[in-house]
Image (cartoon, rainbow, N blue to C red):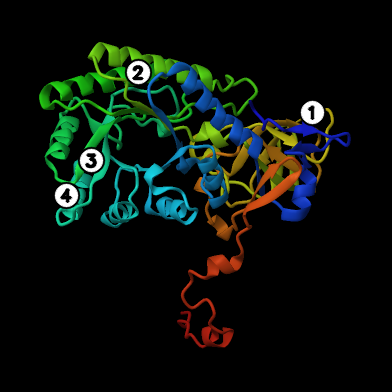
Amino acid sequence: MLWPKTATRDVAGQLVIGGIPVPQLVAEYGTPLYIYDEATIRAQCAAYREALARYYPGPSRIVYAGKAYLSVGLLRLVVEEGLWLDVVSGGELQLALAAGFPPGRIVFHGNNKSEDELQLALEAGIGAVVVDNHYELDLLERLLRDTRQYLAVLVRVNPGVEAHTHAHRKTGQVDSKFGLLIETGDALRAVRRILEMPGLRLRGYHAHIGSQVFELEPYVLAVERLFDFAREMAARFGVVPEEISPGGGLAIQYLPDDPALDIEAFVQTVAGAVQRAAQKARFPLPVLGLEPGRSIVGPAGVAVYRVGAIKEIPGVRCYVSVDGGMADNIRPALYGARYTAVLANRDGPADSVVTIAGKYCESGDVLVDGATLPEPRPGDLVAIAAAGAYCLAMASNYNLALRPAVVLVREGQARLLQRRERIEDVLQREVGAGESSESLAAVELPTPP
């Protein structure tokens, strides 16, 4: 699935999402604009639920990886779908609490949680913290020393499994900043410490091998290594895991030739591996936790830009510049991510190969290199598919860009999730931004030689 489930063209050739022509949304909300299709998000959630019900007879939970994209409106939809939430910072946790997300369904990840963040998690009464290192255990020991609170924890084990994805998206190999290594004994020492610490309850083990992973075999290997470790911990300490989580990271389509997203095959593979490993270990079936993020919101999101300058370099390339770029989507510049683009305001023969360039002051600010479109003209609208994950989450104010508006569409109705950022929002952080021009003019400048 490359485009949202409701995407189509009307008789005028306009791209329609959620029953609304994209040019109509642009007329109301401007560009750049991010459009999320509610029907697609709900369908992805349902696909995970139904596959788990079909292939896993034990208890399970779907934990939405909020780092893919967070907003209050999206979180309320996630709650309705019965999902849990994975946060990786105090900011994400505070947004979730502000949205009314049930704290008991929140899991806190991260490789360098601060004492303040852990204190916030304790005060909120979240469902679990995923322990990533011994420094974190030092902080928790201090925070829990004089309280009667109890905190459920999972140990993030580094399984030494290398996923076939970009180097920046790998997280499960030995050389990673994430997780406690099994082979060095770090993971074992963490389990021993947790079992000895008042206030902590070991719930199970977690691993995450990477993101945008197409192959399923690495997940099987990660599950096997988690259970091998769990068997050793059971033999040493008598502790049997209540929960096993091989994380998320399932790939989605960004280009027509990419393999199609297959949630059912992913769940069937992981669920089968967990059942076999649990039987081998003679453990009861644990809670199987899956952490999809990209595969929930990625295909549901479409980014829309307006074409401005067009620069033709004969025999080289044609640059089509748009009014967004790396400030709202850093992925192409960061690790060469590739996207599919179309014109949203009109259709026609796709006979022009162009480079869709952003407006920011970097030569690497290119959204799509080699896009095939009808010959673009200034004022055209360019829509980029599969823009729902990690674009807005990593958006910045580079060149003092203002972050775009975000709308959710459903059956002909649009709901604003996030308004367009205003310059006033940015200036609020600037000390002295309201000073008069006279006071600035009074500053003495050095006399040139």
| Residue 145 tag number | none
For the residues carrying marks 3 and 1, which lies nearer the camera in this image? 3
Q: Nearer the viewer, residue 204 or 302?
A: 204
Residue at numbered disc 4? 141
Residue 61, placed above or below residue 117: above
Type of amino acid under label 4 = Glu
Residue at numbered disc 3? 133
| Dot placed on the residue nearer the N-terminal end, 3 or 4 | 3
The answer to whether any part of residue 218 appears in the image is: no
Residue at numbered disc 1? 350
Q: CA distance from mark 4 to mark 2?
A: 32 Å
Residue 278 rendering spot, x and y as whole percentages: 29, 16
Q: Residue at x 31, y 56 (%)?
A: 123
Q: CA distance from mark 4 to mark 1?
A: 61 Å
Residue at numbered disc 2? 274
For the residues carrying marks 3 and 4, which lies nearer the camera in this image? 4
The answer to whether any part of residue 85 appears in the image is: yes
Type of amino acid under label 2 = Val
Type of amino acid under label 1 = Ala
| Dot placed on the residue nearer the N-terminal end, 3 or 1 | 3
Q: Residues within 10 Å of mark 2 (few under 14, many from 20)?
A: many
Q: Nearer the viewer, residue 438 or 294?
A: 294
SS label for mark 4: helix
| Dot placed on the residue nearer the N-terminal end, 4 or 1 | 4
